[in-house]
Amino acid sequence: MSKKATLKEVALAAGVSAQTVSRVVNKRPDVAEDTRLHIQQIIEDMGYQPNTHARSLITRHSYTLGVVATGLEFFGPSTVLVGLQQEAEKLGYSLNLILTQELEKEDYRHILNNFGGSQVDGIIWAVPPVGDSRELYIAPLLSDTPPIIFLNHPQVGLSVVAIDNHHGAVLATQHLIEQRYQHIGIITGPSSWWEASERYRGWKETITAAGLAFKSSFVAEGDWTAAGGEKAFLELVEQNHELDAIFVSNDQMALGALKTAHRLGKTIPDNLGIVGFDDYPESAFFIPSLTTIRQPLKEMGAAAVREVVQMIAVHRENQEEYEPKTITLQPRLIIRESSSKRQNPEVHF
Amino acid sequence: MSKKATLKEVALAAGVSAQTVSRVVNKRPDVAEDTRLHIQQIIEDMGYQPNTHARSLITRHSYTLGVVATGLEFFGPSTVLVGLQQEAEKLGYSLNLILTQELEKEDYRHILNNFGGSQVDGIIWAVPPVGDSRELYIAPLLSDTPPIIFLNHPQVGLSVVAIDNHHGAVLATQHLIEQRYQHIGIITGPSSWWEASERYRGWKETITAAGLAFKSSFVAEGDWTAAGGEKAFLELVEQNHELDAIFVSNDQMALGALKTAHRLGKTIPDNLGIVGFDDYPESAFFIPSLTTIRQPLKEMGAAAVREVVQMIAVHRENQEEYEPKTITLQPRLIIRESSSKRQNPEVHF
DNA sequence: GTGAAAGCGCTAACAC
DNA sequence: GTGTTAGCGCTTTCAC
């Protein structure tokens, strides 16, 4: 009982050869029905579980996916992880999880080496690109790694699943314009983040296209946290008395903005319209409830797993490279109180 | 380049035996310094990575921990996971992550079987006990599993790392009493959850000990969500006009309560004191900011990993069982605006 | 349908 | 210090 049963032991107990047991375990058709039933019974009785390591040693695949992630304390990344895990489980894969703290070069090489030894069949890169870090690690990645897919991460010549951050920002800004706000500022994420700059781009293009004023003082940089949002909000309103709406690049910073607006006696949405980004579960319960952009996070995780499993299959059959693919998912606007001027009926001229 | 180098190939290239290379890879002392340097160079050149599966096949340990978790979309569980992963990495272990959706029997057996085959050295059970589910799966666990540790999960005769939920509730309730609130209600989590009932117990004992009124109408059950908190809050205030404080069993439900109080024109903290539980990162930015109980979640994860690694070591040396241990971590009170009566100076008679 | 032999990549035990 | 032999638990190939 204490020691695990092996294939050989099952074979011995069943009075057949190891191969026959192997056939039963792997559901091969070429086993007599009697034999199969008999062996299945013995397997059940002995509580036999095939050793996946021994198996993968010979089959060359582990049915394990390596996931490199970060910021799991936050809603976004952890929701993506849920999507990854659920889809992986559905497709018979398990997940080997690595978290990074710092986003520097040394780290990455180490992680990839690590995956090299642990025989993952594919890698899902769920660490956001910050600054020029992607230039740093792209080179060592290209040779000798299993299929790899990047999440929310522009990569030339590699497969990517991304949410259309630019379009999300456009939706948010357009909505504010439709609500007849005229002077629309932005609180961005850290400028070194790709996602932050995409959202900024969407905002800027939209207000410019609508003929609204663009001033550099309309832009304040936050750090994704509520505290940072508070600080950026103060900067913005102190420097721009005319501002009547702000697109905040995530919900946490928007919460900081909401709180500070409340403290300053600015009425939202009447004095000031606010739209966030992410759709935290709590955002519907902020005071006032927060209009925001919902991202299909679980779907992104699931799509990444599906794609990388595809890549693995192709990689195995033909030795040739898989055609890099970019899958883009669309976010959508969730309208709540923080952006709906009450005295402004929904009339557009 | 495309095919991975093996030990044998390195040995061939270095003109030594496989064994010697193995010694170098495993940092054994009994290798001549010259040989070691030479081999290390070749290893570097060939980009050799030892195959962990082959290794664990023979050493009998995989340096992998199985983690069974759920609710990773939420702050608590995902923060615990961060603690788990960080400590695991520190100790040279990687994580094999399984998420459960439903908390029923079938599921569990399947998961454990799965771990059986994938050669995890230990298991961390991070799924909260709900109802009598623990009775259902405890039996099959006991035989034939690697060392296992439970998080926030009472288990007779097994190792556990838990946060003292009861004490946290005592802290919260005592704080409200010190603030001179007199009629203190509670919004609980689902009664089938162990954590919820522990918090309830702490509240009840504390108000009773203080000689305050206990009425069954002072208790409303929520479902951990903000929407549930809203509903429970309405029940509570409609049925008890005298209520002047509520201990809410988590911050999300507290947020729902805060919003509803605001809508009903109840002033917090003056009309009504609120204390939450969890200390979400956002709780400091709620309106008003939320007094709450902070749990050492990362520490819990880290402690669990340390403990299970201990258990693995003992399990390997002496065949005898490891002495089950219960590690209890203390939460602490974080005082903010939602519980501090302004007109009430801190005078105790 | 079933079995025997060989070997995946590595390390344990022992020889020298 | 270093090499040789054996074998972890499994699947593949090929024989019968």
Image: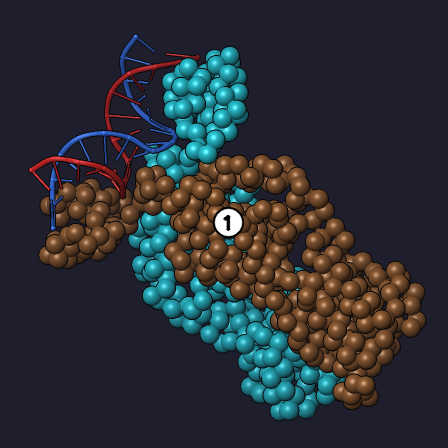
Chain colours: A cyan, B brown, C red, D blue
Image position, residue B285 (x, y; %): 67, 77
Residue drawn at x 59%, y 83% is A232
Residue drawn at x 72%, y 47% is B131
Residue drawn at x 83%, y 60% is B220
Please state which amino acid type lies under the numbered disc 1: Glu
Question: Does residue A302 appear anywhere in the picture?
Answer: no
Residue drawn at x 15%, y 52% is B31
Which quadrant holds residue B326? bottom right
Q: Is residue A334 above or below residue B333?
A: above
**Numbered label tally:** 1
Image position, residue A256 (x, y; %): 65, 78
Image position, residue B103 (x, y; %): 66, 45
Q: Horizontally, is B332 left or right of B13 in the view? A: right
The answer for which chain carries disc 1 is: B
Question: Does residue A139 appear anywhere in the picture?
Answer: yes
Which quadrant holds residue A171? bottom right
Q: Is residue A93 above or below residue A273?
A: above
**Are there few (<14), some (14-19), or many (20+) residues within 10 Å of tag 1?**
few
Q: Horizontally, is A231 left or right of B322 in the view? A: right
Camera-nearest residue between B53 and A234: B53
Instruction: Identify the secondary structure beneath mark 1.
Output: loop
Image position, residue A67 (x, y; %): 46, 54
Camera-nearest residue between D8 and B199: B199
Q: Horizontally, is A97 left or right of B198 in the view? A: left
Q: Which residue is mark 1?
A: B323
Image quarter of the C terminus of chain A: bottom right
Q: Is residue A261 above or below residue A154?
A: below
Which quadrant holds residue B9? top left
